[in-house]
Image: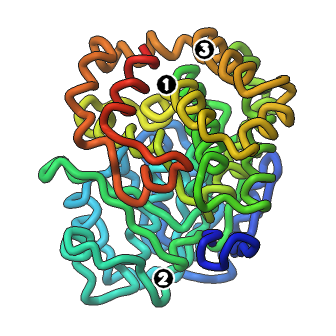
Amino acid sequence: SSTHEFGKVGWSFYNPVRLIFGIDGLNVLPELIMGRRVLLVTTPGFTRRGVTDRVRTLVEPYLAAIVDTIGPNPELDDLEGIAYGLHDIRAEAIVAVGGGSVIDTAKVISAILSREELSLRNYLENDIGELHGTAIPVIAVPTTAGTGSEVTPFATVWDSVSEKKYSLSGPQLFPEVALLDPSMTVSLPRDMTIMTGLDAISQGFEAIWNRNATPVTTIYATEALRIALSTLEQLAMDLDNVRLRAEMLRASAFAGLAISNTRTALAHSMSYPITLHYGVPHGLACGFTLPAILRFNSEVDDGRLHELAIALGMNSVNGLHLHMTQFLERLGVQGMLENYVGCVEELEELVPEMLTPGRSDNNVRRIGWRDLMKILDESK
């Protein structure tokens, strides 16, 4: 997927996920299951609100088990425990109903259940690389418009014991189907709507200021940003608007399609220790640095950031920087961040952990500690 494999003129793009988009699209679940034994993975909140029962009704004859204990940023030990308890149910498909954490969990369970011998901790700690072989197919039903996990081959695994964030990846972690039903996102509260929306916006930018960018990923990322930047503020004031929910879900899927081939870059690299140490939700941890990173990367712009600015209706990268700064101000991002972190200065002690290999080195401009300090300073 990266340009350097083929020299300067070549590129490739691969994404095998079948996308189905539509209000009340959840009702097509029985057709997608095709008679397979199903494991349902979701959250306690969806069980309380009756969503789990709704899904259960749709898949009843084929339902083998339900796991509804998934919370934000699932822990490595918990995931291993859950998966090992499921070996005997012989699931043939997994339906994941939830945000990025639920979909990532489904992918991890899929990887563990399809390998008798896989110790996830051993695999991640030894950095064995990409998973290969088969996995149990995942049907992803996102309930947030943000992570794009429904169309990527990645899963994030957190380990507070060793204070690390791991990424599981491999082509068989692509879900089989992404079932995008905007009505499933309507119950998301305002702050979570904004924070997950910031995740989609971060991924759009990260796919563009990326060494692995291709013409295809740039089209998806630009369109994701065009939609999200013109929708998120309206949605924050009109949470029940299904049309706006649909737009954000579309933006999120497009951003996910872009990073499925580029991976993410500097904003994500900086975000991981912020989430690990302060519990800052992922989209917020990525989003607050975007204007400063845009300015940092604009100093080596090869034309892509200028083209993005024009495509988004600005006359220059400086115009886009100003627009993004004001956009985050209007959404109240600084105040949200301060709910978790007393002040941005406190984050400076995390700088040594912010250069995550495989993320920061995707950034178009090389970066050092001083640059990180400057970016944080500018993001106050």
Amino acid type at mark 1: Phe
- Residue 271: image location, x then y, percent: 39, 38
Can you tell which quarter of the image residue 268 is in?
Answer: top left
Residue at 18 percent across and 47 percent down: it is 163
Left or right: 89 with respect to 30?
left
Which residue: 63% across, 72% down?
A: 1
Residue beneath label 1, please? 288
Gap between marks 3 and 1 measured at Cα: 11 Å
Residue 331, labelled with which disc? 3
> In terms of sequence position, does the residue under pointer 2 or pointer 3 come before the other?
2
**Image position of 41 with respect to 265: above or below:** below
The residue at which mark 2 appears reads as 135
Query: Which three-letter amino acid code belongs to the residue tagged 3?
Result: Leu
Q: State the SS at label 3.
A: helix
User: Residue 174 appears at what percent x and percent y?
Assistant: 58, 71
Q: Distance from label 2 to label 1 (Cα)?
A: 36 Å
Q: Secondary structure at mark 1?
A: loop
